[in-house]
Amino acid sequence: MKVTVFGIGYVGLVQAAVLAEVGHDVVCVDVNAERVENLKNGIIPIYEPGLTPLVQRNYDAGRLQFTTDAAFGVKHGRIQFIAVGTPPDEDGSADLQYVLAVAKTVATYMETPKIIVDKSTVPVGTADKVSACVAAVLAERGVAIGFDVVSNPEFLKEGAAVADCQRPDRIVIGTDSQAVENKMRELYAPFNRNHEKLIVMDVRSAELTKYAANCMLATKISFMNEMANLAEKLGADIEKVRQGIGSDPRIGYHFIYPGCGYGGSCFPKDVQALVRTAEKVGYVPALLKSVEAVNSRQKEKLFGHIQAYFDGDLKGKRIALWGLSFKPNTDDMRDASSRVLMESLWAAGAVVQAYDPEAMNETQRIYGTRSDLTLMGTKESALNGADALVVCTEWNAFKAPDFDLVKDSLTNAVIFDGRNLYDPDMLEEQGIAYYGIGRGRSVLSFA
Ligand code: NAD
Ligand code: UDX
Protein backbone atom coordinates (compact mmCIF):
# COMPACT_ATOMS: atom_id res chain seq x y z
CA MET A 1 0.00 0.00 0.00
CA LYS A 2 1.08 3.59 -0.50
CA VAL A 3 1.60 5.26 2.85
CA THR A 4 2.78 8.72 3.90
CA VAL A 5 4.18 9.49 7.34
CA PHE A 6 4.41 13.09 8.57
CA GLY A 7 7.09 13.47 11.26
CA ILE A 8 10.36 11.52 11.11
CA GLY A 9 11.06 11.22 14.83
CA TYR A 10 11.16 8.20 17.13
CA VAL A 11 7.66 7.10 16.19
CA GLY A 12 7.40 8.21 12.56
CA LEU A 13 10.78 6.90 11.43
CA VAL A 14 10.48 3.53 13.14
CA GLN A 15 6.88 3.03 12.00
CA ALA A 16 7.76 4.03 8.43
CA ALA A 17 10.77 1.71 8.26
CA VAL A 18 8.85 -1.22 9.69
CA LEU A 19 5.98 -0.69 7.22
CA ALA A 20 8.45 -0.47 4.32
CA GLU A 21 10.17 -3.66 5.47
CA VAL A 22 6.96 -5.67 4.90
CA GLY A 23 6.57 -4.22 1.42
CA HIS A 24 4.55 -1.03 1.79
CA ASP A 25 5.63 1.97 -0.28
CA VAL A 26 6.35 4.69 2.28
CA VAL A 27 7.11 8.39 1.91
CA CYS A 28 8.26 10.26 5.03
CA VAL A 29 7.74 14.03 5.21
CA ASP A 30 9.40 16.31 7.76
CA VAL A 31 9.76 20.08 8.07
CA ASN A 32 13.31 19.59 9.34
CA ALA A 33 15.32 19.82 6.11
CA GLU A 34 18.60 18.87 7.79
CA ARG A 35 17.04 15.69 9.17
CA VAL A 36 15.68 14.76 5.74
CA GLU A 37 19.02 15.44 4.03
CA ASN A 38 20.88 13.40 6.65
CA LEU A 39 18.52 10.47 6.23
CA LYS A 40 19.07 10.51 2.49
CA ASN A 41 22.78 10.24 3.27
CA GLY A 42 22.32 7.35 5.68
CA ILE A 43 22.63 9.46 8.85
CA ILE A 44 19.95 8.34 11.31
CA PRO A 45 18.87 11.10 13.71
CA ILE A 46 18.30 8.88 16.75
CA TYR A 47 19.95 5.89 18.39
CA GLU A 48 17.60 2.93 18.33
CA PRO A 49 18.84 -0.68 18.18
CA GLY A 50 18.38 -2.24 14.74
CA LEU A 51 17.09 0.93 13.11
CA THR A 52 20.07 1.93 10.95
CA PRO A 53 20.23 -1.23 8.78
CA LEU A 54 16.43 -1.35 8.57
CA VAL A 55 16.21 2.21 7.26
CA GLN A 56 19.17 1.74 4.95
CA ARG A 57 17.98 -1.40 3.23
CA ASN A 58 14.46 -0.06 2.67
CA TYR A 59 15.78 3.28 1.45
CA ASP A 60 18.12 1.46 -0.95
CA ALA A 61 15.21 -0.70 -2.15
CA GLY A 62 13.18 2.45 -2.89
CA ARG A 63 10.36 1.50 -0.51
CA LEU A 64 11.26 4.29 1.93
CA GLN A 65 11.66 7.90 0.80
CA PHE A 66 12.43 11.07 2.73
CA THR A 67 11.28 14.51 1.68
CA THR A 68 10.33 17.98 2.84
CA ASP A 69 7.91 18.20 -0.12
CA ALA A 70 4.53 18.01 1.60
CA ALA A 71 2.57 18.16 -1.66
CA PHE A 72 4.44 15.11 -2.94
CA GLY A 73 3.79 13.33 0.36
CA VAL A 74 0.07 14.08 0.34
CA LYS A 75 -0.27 12.92 -3.26
CA HIS A 76 1.55 9.65 -2.50
CA GLY A 77 -0.37 7.90 0.27
CA ARG A 78 -3.97 6.78 0.50
CA ILE A 79 -3.08 6.57 4.18
CA GLN A 80 -1.55 9.68 5.78
CA PHE A 81 0.01 9.17 9.21
CA ILE A 82 0.41 12.08 11.60
CA ALA A 83 3.41 11.22 13.81
CA VAL A 84 4.58 14.67 14.92
CA GLY A 85 5.29 15.78 18.47
CA THR A 86 2.61 16.75 21.00
CA PRO A 87 4.72 18.51 23.65
CA PRO A 88 3.21 20.11 26.73
CA ASP A 89 2.04 23.71 26.35
CA GLU A 90 2.33 26.27 29.20
CA ASP A 91 -0.32 24.59 31.35
CA GLY A 92 0.75 21.00 30.62
CA SER A 93 -1.97 20.25 28.05
CA ALA A 94 -0.83 18.54 24.85
CA ASP A 95 0.09 21.20 22.31
CA LEU A 96 -1.71 20.24 19.10
CA GLN A 97 -0.18 22.87 16.83
CA TYR A 98 2.01 20.39 14.93
CA VAL A 99 -0.79 17.85 14.54
CA LEU A 100 -3.17 20.49 13.22
CA ALA A 101 -0.49 21.90 10.93
CA VAL A 102 -0.20 18.47 9.28
CA ALA A 103 -4.00 18.21 9.03
CA LYS A 104 -4.02 21.56 7.27
CA THR A 105 -1.23 20.49 4.93
CA VAL A 106 -3.02 17.28 3.96
CA ALA A 107 -6.25 19.21 3.32
CA THR A 108 -4.39 21.81 1.28
CA TYR A 109 -2.89 19.34 -1.18
CA MET A 110 -5.28 16.37 -1.29
CA GLU A 111 -6.96 15.67 -4.61
CA THR A 112 -8.24 12.15 -3.82
CA PRO A 113 -9.84 10.63 -0.68
CA LYS A 114 -7.48 10.10 2.25
CA ILE A 115 -7.44 8.19 5.51
CA ILE A 116 -5.74 10.44 8.05
CA VAL A 117 -4.29 8.47 10.95
CA ASP A 118 -3.53 10.08 14.31
CA LYS A 119 -0.41 8.16 15.42
CA SER A 120 0.74 10.93 17.74
CA THR A 121 -0.47 10.75 21.33
CA VAL A 122 -3.37 13.18 21.36
CA PRO A 123 -6.10 14.09 23.88
CA VAL A 124 -9.62 12.76 23.51
CA GLY A 125 -11.45 14.87 20.96
CA THR A 126 -8.42 15.52 18.75
CA ALA A 127 -9.74 13.44 15.84
CA ASP A 128 -12.77 15.75 15.83
CA LYS A 129 -10.45 18.77 15.72
CA VAL A 130 -8.43 17.25 12.87
CA SER A 131 -11.68 16.53 10.98
CA ALA A 132 -12.91 20.07 11.50
CA CYS A 133 -9.58 21.49 10.36
CA VAL A 134 -9.51 19.38 7.18
CA ALA A 135 -13.16 20.16 6.42
CA ALA A 136 -12.54 23.90 6.83
CA VAL A 137 -9.59 23.90 4.42
CA LEU A 138 -11.48 21.82 1.85
CA ALA A 139 -14.41 24.24 2.12
CA GLU A 140 -12.04 27.19 1.60
CA ARG A 141 -10.67 25.45 -1.46
CA GLY A 142 -14.24 24.89 -2.63
CA VAL A 143 -13.70 21.16 -3.19
CA ALA A 144 -15.56 18.13 -1.84
CA ILE A 145 -13.14 15.24 -1.31
CA GLY A 146 -13.88 12.41 1.10
CA PHE A 147 -11.64 11.77 4.11
CA ASP A 148 -11.65 9.83 7.37
CA VAL A 149 -9.75 10.44 10.57
CA VAL A 150 -8.64 7.37 12.52
CA SER A 151 -7.01 7.06 15.92
CA ASN A 152 -4.15 4.56 15.93
CA PRO A 153 -2.00 5.27 18.99
CA GLU A 154 1.55 3.99 19.22
CA PHE A 155 2.76 1.86 22.15
CA LEU A 156 6.44 1.39 21.26
CA LYS A 157 9.13 1.75 23.91
CA GLU A 158 12.31 3.60 23.09
CA GLY A 159 15.32 1.31 23.08
CA ALA A 160 13.08 -1.51 21.78
CA ALA A 161 11.13 0.50 19.23
CA VAL A 162 11.90 -1.61 16.17
CA ALA A 163 11.03 -4.86 17.91
CA ASP A 164 7.88 -3.35 19.43
CA CYS A 165 6.69 -2.13 16.02
CA GLN A 166 7.51 -5.38 14.29
CA ARG A 167 5.78 -7.47 16.96
CA PRO A 168 3.17 -5.23 18.59
CA ASP A 169 1.20 -6.54 21.59
CA ARG A 170 -1.88 -4.91 20.13
CA ILE A 171 -2.91 -2.56 17.34
CA VAL A 172 -5.59 -0.18 18.54
CA ILE A 173 -7.79 1.28 15.81
CA GLY A 174 -10.37 3.92 16.63
CA THR A 175 -12.96 4.27 13.89
CA ASP A 176 -16.67 3.84 13.34
CA SER A 177 -16.25 3.07 9.64
CA GLN A 178 -16.10 -0.53 8.41
CA ALA A 179 -14.37 0.57 5.21
CA VAL A 180 -11.62 2.32 7.18
CA GLU A 181 -11.25 -0.68 9.49
CA ASN A 182 -10.80 -2.88 6.42
CA LYS A 183 -8.06 -0.61 5.04
CA MET A 184 -6.24 -0.54 8.38
CA ARG A 185 -6.52 -4.34 8.56
CA GLU A 186 -4.94 -4.56 5.12
CA LEU A 187 -2.12 -2.20 6.18
CA TYR A 188 -1.35 -4.14 9.36
CA ALA A 189 -2.02 -7.65 7.99
CA PRO A 190 1.71 -8.57 8.03
CA PHE A 191 1.80 -7.79 11.79
CA ASN A 192 -1.46 -9.59 12.57
CA ARG A 193 -0.68 -13.13 11.51
CA ASN A 194 -0.56 -15.50 14.46
CA HIS A 195 -3.42 -14.22 16.53
CA GLU A 196 -5.79 -11.26 16.38
CA LYS A 197 -4.01 -8.13 17.52
CA LEU A 198 -6.36 -5.51 16.15
CA ILE A 199 -8.59 -4.02 18.80
CA VAL A 200 -11.15 -1.87 17.03
CA MET A 201 -13.15 0.66 18.99
CA ASP A 202 -14.66 4.12 18.72
CA VAL A 203 -12.27 7.03 18.22
CA ARG A 204 -12.56 8.57 21.69
CA SER A 205 -11.94 5.27 23.45
CA ALA A 206 -8.85 4.71 21.29
CA GLU A 207 -7.53 8.16 22.16
CA LEU A 208 -8.08 7.54 25.87
CA THR A 209 -6.56 4.03 25.68
CA LYS A 210 -3.15 5.52 24.93
CA TYR A 211 -3.19 7.85 27.94
CA ALA A 212 -4.67 5.15 30.19
CA ALA A 213 -1.84 2.76 29.25
CA ASN A 214 0.94 5.25 29.95
CA CYS A 215 -0.69 6.53 33.12
CA MET A 216 -1.20 2.99 34.44
CA LEU A 217 2.49 2.22 33.88
CA ALA A 218 3.56 5.51 35.46
CA THR A 219 1.28 4.76 38.42
CA LYS A 220 2.96 1.39 38.97
CA ILE A 221 6.36 3.08 39.04
CA SER A 222 5.32 5.87 41.40
CA PHE A 223 3.64 3.34 43.68
CA MET A 224 6.88 1.36 43.87
CA ASN A 225 8.90 4.49 44.47
CA GLU A 226 6.58 5.37 47.33
CA MET A 227 7.08 1.87 48.79
CA ALA A 228 10.84 2.27 48.32
CA ASN A 229 10.85 5.52 50.27
CA LEU A 230 8.85 3.84 53.02
CA ALA A 231 11.18 0.83 52.99
CA GLU A 232 14.10 3.19 53.48
CA LYS A 233 12.52 4.68 56.57
CA LEU A 234 11.39 1.30 57.93
CA GLY A 235 14.65 -0.59 57.44
CA ALA A 236 13.20 -2.91 54.76
CA ASP A 237 14.71 -3.71 51.34
CA ILE A 238 12.43 -2.75 48.44
CA GLU A 239 14.18 -5.25 46.16
CA LYS A 240 12.99 -8.09 48.40
CA VAL A 241 9.54 -6.52 48.53
CA ARG A 242 9.50 -6.19 44.72
CA GLN A 243 10.11 -9.90 44.30
CA GLY A 244 7.60 -10.71 47.01
CA ILE A 245 4.79 -8.83 45.32
CA GLY A 246 5.77 -9.41 41.67
CA SER A 247 5.36 -13.16 42.14
CA ASP A 248 1.61 -12.57 42.45
CA PRO A 249 0.42 -12.81 38.82
CA ARG A 250 -2.23 -10.19 39.55
CA ILE A 251 0.63 -7.73 40.18
CA GLY A 252 3.37 -9.14 37.93
CA TYR A 253 7.07 -8.31 37.66
CA HIS A 254 6.84 -5.68 34.92
CA PHE A 255 7.20 -1.98 35.65
CA ILE A 256 7.66 -2.32 39.39
CA TYR A 257 11.32 -1.35 39.46
CA PRO A 258 11.92 1.50 41.89
CA GLY A 259 14.46 4.11 40.91
CA CYS A 260 15.31 7.78 40.55
CA GLY A 261 12.03 8.51 38.78
CA TYR A 262 10.53 7.96 35.37
CA GLY A 263 11.56 10.20 32.48
CA GLY A 264 11.37 10.18 28.71
CA SER A 265 9.20 11.88 26.18
CA CYS A 266 5.99 10.12 27.19
CA PHE A 267 5.19 9.37 30.84
CA PRO A 268 5.86 12.84 32.29
CA LYS A 269 4.02 14.70 29.54
CA ASP A 270 1.18 12.21 29.16
CA VAL A 271 0.37 12.05 32.89
CA GLN A 272 0.38 15.83 32.95
CA ALA A 273 -1.79 16.06 29.82
CA LEU A 274 -4.39 13.64 31.19
CA VAL A 275 -4.51 15.65 34.42
CA ARG A 276 -5.29 18.76 32.36
CA THR A 277 -7.86 16.89 30.23
CA ALA A 278 -9.59 15.72 33.43
CA GLU A 279 -9.61 19.19 34.92
CA LYS A 280 -11.09 20.65 31.74
CA VAL A 281 -14.10 18.34 32.07
CA GLY A 282 -14.47 19.14 35.77
CA TYR A 283 -12.98 15.95 37.20
CA VAL A 284 -10.30 16.09 39.91
CA PRO A 285 -7.71 13.42 38.99
CA ALA A 286 -6.38 12.90 42.52
CA LEU A 287 -4.47 9.70 41.76
CA LEU A 288 -2.78 11.04 38.62
CA LYS A 289 -1.71 14.21 40.42
CA SER A 290 -0.08 12.10 43.11
CA VAL A 291 1.68 9.96 40.50
CA GLU A 292 3.17 13.13 39.08
CA ALA A 293 4.08 14.59 42.48
CA VAL A 294 5.74 11.37 43.67
CA ASN A 295 7.79 11.25 40.47
CA SER A 296 8.95 14.86 40.69
CA ARG A 297 10.10 14.23 44.26
CA GLN A 298 11.76 10.97 43.25
CA LYS A 299 13.88 12.74 40.66
CA GLU A 300 15.39 14.82 43.48
CA LYS A 301 16.13 11.81 45.61
CA LEU A 302 19.68 11.11 44.49
CA PHE A 303 20.62 14.72 45.03
CA GLY A 304 19.08 14.58 48.50
CA HIS A 305 21.18 11.52 49.35
CA ILE A 306 24.37 13.06 48.01
CA GLN A 307 23.75 16.33 49.81
CA ALA A 308 23.06 14.55 53.10
CA TYR A 309 26.19 12.40 52.70
CA PHE A 310 28.38 15.46 52.23
CA ASP A 311 26.67 17.36 55.08
CA GLY A 312 25.12 19.85 52.70
CA ASP A 313 28.45 21.07 51.35
CA LEU A 314 28.85 20.19 47.69
CA LYS A 315 30.90 23.19 46.66
CA GLY A 316 33.81 22.00 44.54
CA LYS A 317 32.85 18.34 44.94
CA ARG A 318 33.54 16.23 41.85
CA ILE A 319 30.77 13.77 41.04
CA ALA A 320 31.19 10.88 38.59
CA LEU A 321 27.89 10.23 36.79
CA TRP A 322 27.17 7.02 34.89
CA GLY A 323 24.11 7.21 32.63
CA LEU A 324 22.55 10.31 31.07
CA SER A 325 19.75 8.96 28.85
CA PHE A 326 16.33 8.53 30.48
CA LYS A 327 16.65 4.75 30.09
CA PRO A 328 19.15 2.33 28.52
CA ASN A 329 19.46 1.71 24.75
CA THR A 330 18.49 5.22 23.72
CA ASP A 331 20.21 8.57 23.41
CA ASP A 332 17.02 10.38 24.38
CA MET A 333 17.43 12.75 27.33
CA ARG A 334 13.95 14.26 27.35
CA ASP A 335 12.89 14.60 31.00
CA ALA A 336 15.78 12.35 32.09
CA SER A 337 16.45 12.05 35.82
CA SER A 338 20.13 12.71 35.12
CA ARG A 339 19.23 16.26 34.09
CA VAL A 340 17.46 17.04 37.35
CA LEU A 341 20.44 15.64 39.25
CA MET A 342 23.09 17.50 37.24
CA GLU A 343 21.24 20.79 37.46
CA SER A 344 20.88 20.44 41.25
CA LEU A 345 24.56 19.51 41.60
CA TRP A 346 25.62 22.52 39.56
CA ALA A 347 23.39 24.84 41.58
CA ALA A 348 25.12 23.53 44.72
CA GLY A 349 28.58 24.21 43.26
CA ALA A 350 29.57 20.64 42.38
CA VAL A 351 31.18 19.58 39.11
CA VAL A 352 30.10 16.55 37.09
CA GLN A 353 32.24 14.04 35.18
CA ALA A 354 29.71 12.18 33.06
CA TYR A 355 29.70 9.14 30.82
CA ASP A 356 26.91 7.52 28.80
CA PRO A 357 27.30 4.88 26.08
CA GLU A 358 25.08 6.78 23.60
CA ALA A 359 23.86 10.11 24.97
CA MET A 360 27.10 12.12 25.00
CA ASN A 361 26.31 14.09 21.84
CA GLU A 362 22.80 14.80 23.07
CA THR A 363 24.20 16.03 26.42
CA GLN A 364 26.60 18.29 24.57
CA ARG A 365 23.77 19.59 22.39
CA ILE A 366 21.60 20.39 25.43
CA TYR A 367 24.20 21.84 27.81
CA GLY A 368 26.94 23.03 25.48
CA THR A 369 30.35 23.69 26.98
CA ARG A 370 30.43 24.58 30.66
CA SER A 371 33.16 24.45 33.26
CA ASP A 372 31.18 22.28 35.68
CA LEU A 373 30.52 19.48 33.19
CA THR A 374 33.13 17.21 31.66
CA LEU A 375 32.03 14.55 29.22
CA MET A 376 34.35 11.57 29.62
CA GLY A 377 35.23 9.00 26.97
CA THR A 378 34.80 5.92 29.17
CA LYS A 379 33.02 4.95 32.37
CA GLU A 380 36.41 4.33 34.00
CA SER A 381 37.82 7.78 33.19
CA ALA A 382 34.68 9.38 34.62
CA LEU A 383 35.72 8.01 38.03
CA ASN A 384 39.16 9.59 38.15
CA GLY A 385 39.54 11.82 41.17
CA ALA A 386 35.78 11.95 41.82
CA ASP A 387 34.36 12.25 45.33
CA ALA A 388 31.46 9.89 44.58
CA LEU A 389 29.93 7.75 41.85
CA VAL A 390 26.26 8.14 40.92
CA VAL A 391 24.37 5.78 38.60
CA CYS A 392 21.31 7.21 36.86
CA THR A 393 20.66 4.74 34.02
CA GLU A 394 20.86 0.95 34.06
CA TRP A 395 22.93 0.41 30.91
CA ASN A 396 24.34 -3.15 30.76
CA ALA A 397 27.85 -1.66 30.73
CA PHE A 398 27.33 -0.45 34.31
CA LYS A 399 25.98 -3.68 35.76
CA ALA A 400 29.23 -5.45 36.66
CA PRO A 401 31.99 -2.87 37.07
CA ASP A 402 35.44 -3.60 38.47
CA PHE A 403 34.74 -2.47 42.02
CA ASP A 404 38.44 -2.47 42.95
CA LEU A 405 39.00 0.04 40.17
CA VAL A 406 35.98 2.07 41.29
CA LYS A 407 37.35 2.16 44.83
CA ASP A 408 40.87 3.06 43.74
CA SER A 409 39.73 5.77 41.31
CA LEU A 410 37.38 7.58 43.69
CA THR A 411 38.83 9.81 46.38
CA ASN A 412 35.90 8.71 48.49
CA ALA A 413 34.53 5.16 48.17
CA VAL A 414 30.82 5.84 47.88
CA ILE A 415 28.19 4.88 45.28
CA PHE A 416 24.73 6.41 44.95
CA ASP A 417 22.73 4.00 42.83
CA GLY A 418 19.54 5.36 41.25
CA ARG A 419 18.65 2.00 39.67
CA ASN A 420 19.51 -0.54 42.40
CA LEU A 421 22.05 -2.32 40.22
CA TYR A 422 24.36 -3.54 42.96
CA ASP A 423 24.25 -5.82 45.96
CA PRO A 424 24.59 -3.76 49.15
CA ASP A 425 26.20 -6.65 51.08
CA MET A 426 28.81 -7.19 48.39
CA LEU A 427 29.71 -3.52 48.34
CA GLU A 428 29.94 -3.42 52.11
CA GLU A 429 32.42 -6.30 51.96
CA GLN A 430 34.42 -4.35 49.38
CA GLY A 431 34.53 -1.37 51.71
CA ILE A 432 32.38 0.84 49.48
CA ALA A 433 29.59 2.88 51.03
CA TYR A 434 26.39 2.24 49.07
CA TYR A 435 23.09 4.09 48.88
CA GLY A 436 20.44 2.70 46.59
CA ILE A 437 16.74 3.45 46.40
CA GLY A 438 14.78 1.91 49.28
CA ARG A 439 17.48 -0.51 50.38
CA GLY A 440 16.75 -0.29 54.10
CA ARG A 441 20.22 0.51 55.36
CA SER A 442 20.24 4.04 54.00
CA VAL A 443 20.47 6.59 56.77
CA LEU A 444 20.46 9.45 54.35
CA SER A 445 16.74 9.88 53.81
CA PHE A 446 15.97 13.40 52.84
CA ALA A 447 12.91 15.22 54.05
P1 NAD B 1 9.93 13.58 17.76
O1 NAD B 1 10.05 14.89 18.39
O2 NAD B 1 11.05 12.58 17.86
O3 NAD B 1 9.63 13.76 16.19
C1 NAD B 1 8.66 14.61 15.68
C2 NAD B 1 9.05 14.98 14.25
O4 NAD B 1 7.96 15.71 13.66
C3 NAD B 1 10.27 15.91 14.15
O5 NAD B 1 11.22 15.35 13.26
C4 NAD B 1 9.69 17.23 13.61
O6 NAD B 1 10.59 17.95 12.79
C5 NAD B 1 8.51 16.71 12.81
N1 NAD B 1 7.48 17.71 12.50
C6 NAD B 1 7.00 18.71 13.25
N2 NAD B 1 6.05 19.40 12.59
C7 NAD B 1 5.92 18.82 11.37
C8 NAD B 1 5.09 19.05 10.24
N3 NAD B 1 4.20 20.04 10.23
N4 NAD B 1 5.24 18.26 9.16
C9 NAD B 1 6.14 17.25 9.15
N5 NAD B 1 6.95 16.97 10.20
C10 NAD B 1 6.84 17.74 11.30
O7 NAD B 1 8.58 12.94 18.34
P2 NAD B 1 8.29 11.41 18.75
O8 NAD B 1 9.02 11.07 20.00
O9 NAD B 1 8.43 10.55 17.56
O10 NAD B 1 6.74 11.53 19.15
C11 NAD B 1 5.75 11.75 18.18
C12 NAD B 1 4.40 11.47 18.81
O11 NAD B 1 4.30 10.08 19.17
C13 NAD B 1 4.12 12.25 20.11
O12 NAD B 1 2.75 12.55 20.18
C14 NAD B 1 4.49 11.24 21.19
O13 NAD B 1 3.80 11.47 22.39
C15 NAD B 1 4.02 9.95 20.56
N6 NAD B 1 4.71 8.75 21.05
C16 NAD B 1 6.05 8.79 21.27
C17 NAD B 1 6.71 7.62 21.70
C18 NAD B 1 8.18 7.64 21.99
O14 NAD B 1 8.64 6.71 22.62
N7 NAD B 1 8.93 8.64 21.54
C19 NAD B 1 5.98 6.45 21.90
C20 NAD B 1 4.60 6.45 21.63
C21 NAD B 1 3.99 7.61 21.21
C1 UDX C 1 6.76 4.43 27.40
C2 UDX C 1 5.78 3.25 27.30
O1 UDX C 1 6.37 2.10 27.93
C3 UDX C 1 5.45 2.95 25.86
O2 UDX C 1 4.47 1.90 25.78
C4 UDX C 1 4.89 4.23 25.23
O3 UDX C 1 4.57 4.01 23.86
C5 UDX C 1 5.87 5.38 25.36
O4 UDX C 1 6.20 5.56 26.75
P1 UDX C 1 9.37 4.76 27.03
O5 UDX C 1 9.14 6.12 27.59
O6 UDX C 1 10.16 4.61 25.78
O7 UDX C 1 7.97 4.03 26.76
O8 UDX C 1 10.16 3.88 28.10
P2 UDX C 1 9.75 2.94 29.35
O9 UDX C 1 10.48 1.67 29.23
O10 UDX C 1 8.29 2.85 29.54
O11 UDX C 1 10.38 3.74 30.57
C6 UDX C 1 9.92 5.03 30.93
C7 UDX C 1 10.59 5.48 32.21
O12 UDX C 1 10.14 4.69 33.31
C8 UDX C 1 12.12 5.35 32.19
O13 UDX C 1 12.69 6.52 32.77
C9 UDX C 1 12.40 4.14 33.03
O14 UDX C 1 13.65 4.21 33.69
C10 UDX C 1 11.26 4.23 34.06
N1 UDX C 1 10.91 2.92 34.65
C11 UDX C 1 10.40 1.92 33.88
C12 UDX C 1 11.06 2.74 36.03
O15 UDX C 1 11.51 3.64 36.75
N2 UDX C 1 10.69 1.53 36.57
C13 UDX C 1 10.18 0.51 35.83
O16 UDX C 1 9.85 -0.54 36.41
C14 UDX C 1 10.02 0.71 34.44
Image: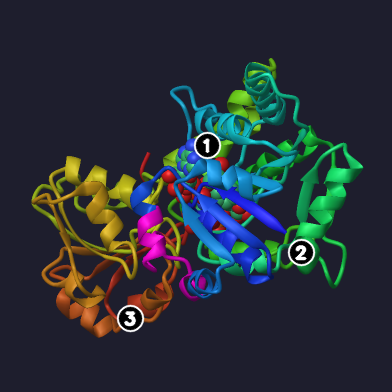
Marks 1 and 3, how far apart at CA: 39 Å
Nearer the viewer's eye, disc 1 or disc 3?
1
Q: Which residue is mark 2?
A: 248
Q: Secondary structure at mark 2?
A: loop
Q: Which mark is residue 401?
A: 3
Residue at image position (18%, 45%) is: 346
Q: Secondary structure at mark 3?
A: loop
Q: Is residue 226 visible?
A: no
Q: Residues within 10 Å of mark 1 (few under 14, many from 20)?
A: many
| Membership of 45 in magenta stretch | yes
Q: Amino acid at mark 1?
A: Thr
Residue range in magenta is 36-53
Tag 1 and tag 3, C-beta contact below 8 Å: no
| Viewport quadrant of the N terminus | bottom right
Q: Is residue 404 visible?
A: yes
Q: Residues within 10 Å of mark 2 (few under 14, many from 20)?
A: few
In the drawing, does residue 333 fall left or right of residue 295? Answer: left
| Marks 1 and 3, the one that precedes in the sequence | 1
In this rendered view, identify the residue nearer to me: 188 or 200. 188
Q: Which residue is mark 1?
A: 86
